Image (cartoon, rainbow, N blue to C red):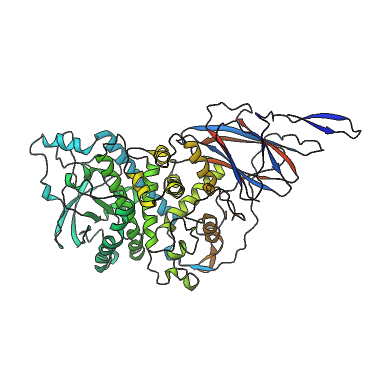
Amino acid sequence: MPVAAPSAGNTPQTITVALLVLSSNETTTISAAGGSTVFLESPNLGTQLTVQGGNQFLIAVVNTAATASVTEDFRLAGALIVEGAAATQPAAARPATRYVPPESPRIPTFAASQSVVVPRPLLERLAQNHLTALERNRELYAWRGNPRDARARVSALSGRRAPVAAAVSTTIGAVNKVYVAKTLGGDCTDVDSIGARTVEVGQHIIVLADTNRTTWPQADRPDSSFYQTFADEYDQVTWPHLLANIGDPLAFDDSLSGVGKVTLTITPLLNSIGGGLLAFVNGCDFFPFASSGPDADFSNFTEMFYSMVPSPSTFSVVNWEKQLRATAAHETKHIVSFADRILNNSPAFEEIWLEEGLAQVSSEIWMRHFNQATWKGNADFRQTVGCELHLGPSAPCNSGNDKPLDLVISHLPFLFEYLQKESESHNEGLGQDLASDYGAGWSFARWTIDQYAIDEGTFVKGLINTSLIGVANLSINSGHRGEDALLLTFWNMATGIYNIPSYTPGDPRITTPSFNFPEIFNVGQTQLTCSGTPCGLFTQSGEPVFPIQPIAISGAFNQAVQGLRGTSAAFFLLSAASSGKQALQLQSGGGGTLSPSSNLRVGIIRVH
């Protein structure tokens, strides 16, 4: 790209900016902080960005492949062209320099009760086992096919099917024989049978408690009044929420035992499965009971979800009760999903990251009955975390310390972890790990709902009651069939949280309207004390303050990124020291022209 500039003797000379042969002469001007632009038509970004000294731009290079298994290498190159002066030469590739935002004032204002900050290793172990159980259900559906077909096969084999009436008793005090999976793998006969007493019967739920007093001693059991309180809340809050926003958990009930209620089974067996399984839905329960044969299945033949019990190594009784209330909205969503897939004769179960992400959406919406968040209400720390943790008189939302635990032990920390890992290693992407399923899956689903839903509940139910899966499910239901690049680029721009914005976004698509994530992360990392010591909610040290730490670039640069996974982004912070034209080009990993089939796309936000 030749640039004419006057010499000392006023004789023009030609300066060549190496490696920046732009694919077009396009000039990009973002006139105000909060403005943005995206390059969605082609991976071959070539533009001159108009800059003034002191401007900063957040650049997201997004791999818009719909699966994380598709990786790409690239280089982002740049040079500053100043009118009347020599152009800066692009620098050779060098190790990435992370942007460090100005230190936030660390003035702790909230005293968090240490007893409700659940250890991350425990949460991660419980979450991993839950994902393994979900994957088992997905494989079960793929292997055995639709349960309606299995029912026809079993019906043809006389004497192998259990009586329908053998499901669950609605008589309080009755002891039921319940089959519980004893491993995270195995087939539908790999079970233990337990005695589970009917301890409460609501209008829409039956609560069963394991009778084993050795593995679940009295000291770790809730007061019996909790069961009634839980069932009442399920009937009065959770059930209406499910019907309005998720779907009908009993849509397949006529083909099961026909009890007409969801069943919760609480058993210590889950505490020992794989080191602990918080809760799960067993897909085997949707298939008919068969004692032998190719469809052998010790099924409970009813809509059931299972919960672990309190214990000294997991949750105290009080915190177990708090999380179970929100978990019920999460797990019942999985029941709805399984029933809808059966009734739609779907060829496949939903991808795990979106199945889990939408279950997170279910409990998040449910939590609005107990916090101060609203749909598209830009909820902050006080309105979310402050309504779950007991933070004293300065955060009176939870002054009674009786609110459920939900966002603070799952959604928010896993989203923080996902963004931090994405920023540090570029080895993230939907469906990669715990953080990508619980945090990013929820974030992408929530962003899509916020951007494209006219009626929130109707939109969410459409994402669940479908045969579509993954990114295609979100893009088609949002009205953007075949435009995965659009959704993935804007969602990644919306999650590029590296500082509290001092601007108003010009395009609402670069925000997640329901949550003020920068404020939540900032306060959670800088303004808490645990047992009198400053601490962070998302990392014990309180560092980093913001999960995204973009690569710092300025003037002349040639920055390489290797192995950027599909659905994820690499973030850069371009700081302009002088006024002029900042030439930008996206190149292949080897420094050449990107293939037209490349999935890479670019978004730019002026942040200062």
Q: Is residue 279 visible?
A: no
Image point 39% across, 50% down: which residue?
125
Give residue 139's position: percent from left, percent from top: 30, 37
| Screen quadrant of the N terminus | top right
- State the residue in front, 11 or 497: 11
Q: Is residue 491 visible?
A: yes
Q: Is residue 470 above or below residue 318?
A: above
The extreme front residue here reads: 454
The extreme bottom residue here reads: 393
Give residue 573's position: percent from left, percent from top: 64, 45
- State the residue in front, 6 or 319: 6
Q: Is residue 244 above or below residue 421?
A: below
- State the residue in front, 118 or 569: 569
Q: Is residue 139 above or below residue 373?
A: above
Image point 54% across, 32% down: which residue?
72
Q: Quadrant of residue 307?
A: bottom left
Give residue 455's position: percent from left, percent from top: 38, 51
